[in-house]
Amino acid sequence: MSKIAADFGIHDALKALGIKDINEGTSTGSNQFSSGEVISSYSPVDGSLIAKVKTTTVADYEKVMSTATTAFKEWRTKPAPQRGEVVRQFGDKLRELKEPLGKLVSYEMGKSYQEGLGEVQEMIDICDFAVGLSRQLHGLTMHSERPGHRMYEQYHSLGVVGIISAFNFPVAVWAWNTALAWICGDVCVWKPSEKTPLCGVACQNIAASVMKANNLPEGISCLINGDYKIGELMTQDKRVPLVSATGSIRMGKIVAQAVAARLGKSLLELGGNNAIIVTPDADLKMTVIGAVFGAVGTAGQRCTSTRRLIIHESMYDKVKDAVVAAYQQLRIGNPLDENNHVGPLIDTDAVAQYNKALEKVVKEGGKLIVEGGVLEGEGYESGCYVKPAIAEAENDFEIVQHETFAPVLYLLKYTGDVENAIAIQNGVVQGLSSAIMTNNLREAERFLSAWGSDCGIANVNIGTSGAEIGGAFGGEKETGGGRESGSDAWKVYMRRQTNTINYTTELPLAQGIKFDL
């Protein structure tokens, strides 16, 4: 075990989560059918091998699906409040294991320990939300046009929900889907990112322990591991009526086409190219805090990370100088050390994409005002640590139109009124998160209006990253149009049914048709 892992208690965290580290042998996790090849999980924090996980073969997948479909038949018969009670227990188990799971998230993915704990807290919060929701899965009652008839609609369990999650939120996004799917009476088959397989094993171990304590079938929560080929088994499987996929736009288009070809449903949470508009009436201090955290939090690897800062010409130099000064204070290093602000990128492939982005923005005519670069030397042995960079650019640059999953912030200038800034913000194919910094009520309302921001999330005087559980999370355009978490997002996990009851002794036909027997 590495010195960092030893100093920060990673071995104890793994043990608490039922995972054997590399010194104890290969880990596969409970309730996981696996006999395939091995995935080695390396930490981007120090480059150390943490543990190994077996991948799922086609035969293993069939066992998983058989177990899941069988479990669904029993699980859907449980009253929703009883399902909510199981989710409540799952949330309590997460409370018990918040610290070790937060450490694993930080060490395997590379985000700060505070963010790792925050991600587990999101899991706990969605469980709380789901517990209350389990008593509110309501339909509507309508007045029938026919005398002696009653009409209403209700929602029923959908079946097996397939979940494909990304490395940047290795546990929370799964929980967003799973907690809601469970209270809706669905069972879940989860393929976590092959870059963070141990987080998947840990969550599965926790879920399996709760199911076992309640004498419930293990197929309510299933785990499969592997690359995109394993994900394809779910997207093409008619036994999976809903596939919820988080990842790149390229991946989402492939998933959408495959699921649509069999007339299934897909819930897509894809790329973001998020902007903060800074108007002449903006609070400078709040602007700097929102922009810097949004751009460098999780090393720029959030789908809601701030990629573009659209600044009015009258404020441009003042905002630029303040943001650049703030960047000079950033501490980059081991994310388990709470004194550091920025951890590593997920792997060296991500570093290569970061370098390409910096080269391209300069080639297209941009100017780097905070130089980037890969950090080397003591503490940076993994080769995954980079400097957050800032570039002056134009919105129509190809690289600015593209989402780079790294801490690269583009400064863009606008003139005139806020409508011009909104046009720049909307001038990308992605439509996830957006924000405006202003104390001008008219500007704020214009930004939030039907002809304002075209994103699924639009904020005033807060940044683009971070979302509360109570609101539906998702975006428009090539972000996919899906909604997860709060509000009425639960409806996607259920099938809708309209019912009509005739309590008379006659059967009137539609359009006045007579059919006497």
Image (spheres, rainbow, N blue to C red):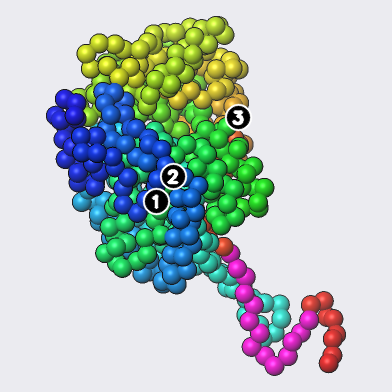
Disc 3 versus disc 1: nearer the observer:
1
Q: Is residue 410 visible?
A: yes
* Residue on which the image places disc 1: 33
Counting residues from the start of the chain, the first of labels 2 and 3 encountered is: 2
Give the image location of residue 236, x and y in percent.
59, 48
User: In the picture, residue 499 is in which quadrant?
Assistant: bottom right
Instruction: Give whichever of 111, 486 is nearer the camera.
Output: 111
Instruction: Give whichever of 10, 267 is nearer the camera.
Output: 10
Q: Dot 1: within a 10 Å radius of its alpha carbon, few (fewer than 14), some, or many (20 or more) residues?
A: many
Image: 179 above or below 155:
above
Q: Secondary structure at mark 1?
A: loop
Q: How many angstroms separate mark 2 from mark 3 (CA)?
A: 35 Å
> CB atoms at circles 2 and 1 under 8 Å apart?
yes
The amino acid sitting under disc 2 is Thr
User: In the picture, residue 84 is in which quadrant?
Assistant: bottom left
Image: 497 above or below 273:
below
Counting residues from the start of the chain, the first of labels 2 and 1 encountered is: 1
Counting residues from the start of the chain, the first of labels 3 and 1 encountered is: 1
The amino acid sitting under disc 1 is Phe
* Residue on which the image places disc 2: 56
Q: Residue at x 52, y 33 (%)?
A: 248
Q: Is residue 162 left or right of residue 335?
A: right
* Residue on which the image places disc 3: 429
Please give the range of residues in magenta: 496-509
Q: Is residue 411 visible?
A: no
